Image (spheres, rainbow, N blue to C red):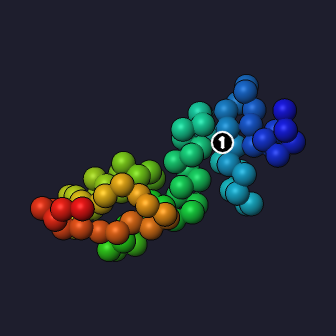
Amino acid sequence: MDNALHSWFSAAEGWMCPEPGCGKWLRNSKRLSDHRAWHRGDTQCPVCHRRLSDKHYLREHAWNVHNLVLPPLRGRRWPAYHRGDQY
């Protein structure tokens, strides 16, 4: 196994976040991907800047709190649209 991959993977214990100072263990690679998106700021609300645990909850938050529909992510930041807008 590649040394870079070995530093954040353990089949017995799950996946460890490679971010310096984090060290959080996650049960599968999907959870690790979601967690790393949080570190990158991909799950931050474009309106109130609240960070949510994953993109699903961000979309739900935008819809329920701000009356916004978030289109598919392009790049690393979310353009925001009000419900009913076409994109």
Question: Looking at this view, is 26 or 30 the one in front?
Answer: 30
Question: Looking at this view, is 78 or 62 the one in front?
Answer: 78
Specify whether 69 is left or right of 46. left
Location of residue 12 with respect to 76 vertically, above or below: above
Q: Secondary structure at mark 1?
A: strand
- Count residues near mark 1 (Cα–Cα under 10 Å), then give few for <14, some for 14-19, many for 20+: some
Report which residue position mark 1 lands on: 25
Specify whether 49 is left or right of 37. left
Specify whether 83 is left or right of 75. left
Q: What residue is rendered at 44% in x and 51% in y?
A: 54
- Residue lying furthest top: 12
Q: What residue is rendered at 52% in x and 58% in y?
A: 38
Location of residue 15 with respect to 24 vertically, above or below: above
Q: What residue is rendered at 49% in x and 64% in y?
A: 76
Do we see residue 29 in this rendering?
yes
- Residue lying furthest front: 87
User: Label 1 amino acid?
Assistant: Trp
Q: What residue is rendered at 68% in x and 49% in y?
A: 17
